[in-house]
Amino acid sequence: MADKTGYMENATPALELQDLRKTFPADGGRISAVDGIDLAVMAGEIVALLGPNGAGKTTTIDMALGLTAPSSGTVSVFGQRPETAVRAGRMSALLQTGGLLRDLTVQETVLAIASLHGAKARVEEVMAATDTTRLARRKVVKCSGGEQQRLKFALALLPDPDILILDEPTAGMDVNARRDFWATMRRDATAGRTVIFATHYLEEAESFAQRIVLMNGGKIIADGSTSSVRALAAGRTVAATLQERGSIDDRDPRLAELRSLAGVTDVQVNGTRVAITTTDSDAVARHLLNGGGGSALEISAPSLESAFVRMTRDTHPAAPPAPSADTVGA
Amino acid sequence: MNATFVRIDLTRQLRDVMNLMFVLVLPTLMYVIFGLSFSYANESAGNGNVKFYIMASMAAYGASVAATTVTGVSAVEQMQGWGRQIGLTPLRPAGFVAGKAVVALVVTALSIAVVFIVGALTGAHADHGWMWAATFAIALAGSILFALFGYAIAMLFKSESAMGIASGLLVVLSFLGNVFVPLSGTLLDVARFTPMYGFVGLVRWPILEGAQSGSADVDPLWGLVANLVAWLLIFGIVAVLAVRRGRTRR
């Protein structure tokens, strides 16, 4: 490329995963936890890795950090091996499970890890930034789940990394603790860092990330800007009863009529009721009430969650549809 | 290795009440009970007196508990996520092991030292001054066997209950290994093949030179060394196999 503006350095992705796979032995065979992931994250991006439990998020993160060796595929961090980036302090992480010694105090934990990074000078600053200074003398075992996560967050900030990876940082926190955590994050942590965080809370992904990577079954099923992923959930759902008893026949001509309406993207049958996803809910409602055979109408705006449920269901045809507050039940 | 990291780890070990009870207090208490409350305590035994013999035995037991605890607890913590946390720092595994070795040595040395100090204050006697240093050094060096033992048990059972199992086993092995109560006859024949036997026999070598308190048999030095080396190999191999099994399971 004839790029003369000096962007070549920036053109190397901060993190690049190529055809990454990981299989584990199970029941005589092997199960695939990560099944061919390609992902490039540019410097400064804030990316949410969104997916249900078992989607392969943690395994992907472990491989990105060099904690687990991939079965095949490559990981590169600023063009280097992940271990090299971790040892140089360019990449660090808040890991999901454990990771703390219960009988150390908060201060001792930070100091111990800081000494390994040669970053003792940053202890005070990092503890202030993560609001752990007032916990300094408390034993880890006496800290709440949210406080322990903040401590782990402090440990992740110690090397002043360029890439920060957070594996479900707010798992097990109540709503207030979650809000506090993200407020801290917004205030101090990003500052030009590349941030990749795994979560199964949609609102966290929506409100904090610029880009959402949706994972399910070890694969990436959607990858785009937060607004484009949110667009997946555009439109309304109109639900109505089509008959009093039994269940609606798939070949019912009324379903074909509904599908043919302008703006309709999906028609789901649920017993005696039908749920229509559409960009023009007024037209669908009018049709159903004016001779379309519908009664007991409900119109709702689906959240990202229902889009998410629909997409993860589509890639797992055998799984039963997950119930959701937004898709109307009978 | 990193001085701050080692210092914090050491502080942590030394304020753990359970640790202190089993590593520092219990061996000393057992010396006091077995060593001071009997009429024969001041009689001579080998190159010293009975008190020195019992002091050396309890120091050996304390050293085995200390080494087992430090490495065993460390292995359990590694499995519970601390290893992953350390894996995100520049500290290499060799540096981590070296740091733990220092901590284990210090805690073990303290455990032996407490028994020795109480022994010295209560009339344990050796014919030569160097016997104190030699007994101390042999107990400290031989405790590496139990560092491996603690690690192997932790890797096999993979939970905090591993430490309970290890301490219980140590008590049984100490009885079987001629540490607490002098054995004789068939029990002594069996004892020669158990892991504590070679270790404690070597710790007592300066005072007894292989003689037994419960039997007229005299153990040759090579027999005690062979026992220690064989168990070093066995626990070492078990530890390596357990680590491999743990890896393939993940």
Image: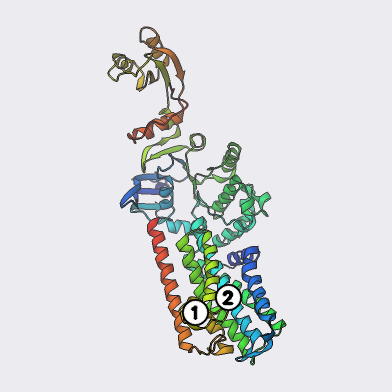
Marked residue chain, label 1: B
Q: Is residue A27 visible?
A: yes
In the image, is A172 to the left or to the right of A297? right
Q: Is residue A77 visible?
A: no
Near-viewer residue (B191 or A321): B191
In the image, is B25 to the left or to the right of A166? right
Residue B19: image location, x then y, percent: 62, 66
Quadrant of the rendering where the C terminus of chain A is positioned: top left
Near-viewer residue (A268 or B93): A268
Q: Give the residue type that dot 2 points to.
A: Tyr
Q: Give the residue type that dot 1 points to.
A: Leu
Residue under disc 2 on the same chain as residue under disc 1:
yes
Near-viewer residue (A207 or A105): A105
Identity of the residue furthest to the top in this view = A290
The colour scheme used here is rainbow
Residue B80: image location, x then y, percent: 51, 56
Residue A14: image location, x then y, percent: 43, 49
Identity of the residue furthest to the left in this view = A251
Quadrant of the rendering where the N terminus of chain A is positioned: top left
Residue A175: image location, x then y, percent: 58, 36
Q: Secondary structure at mark 2?
A: helix
Marked residue chain, label 2: B
Marks 2/1: CA distance? 19 Å
Compared with A255, A114 (above or below) is below
Circle 2 is placed at which residue position?
A: B61
**Residue B246 picture quarter:** bottom left
Compared with B63, B157 (above or below) is above
Circle 1 is placed at which residue position?
A: B187
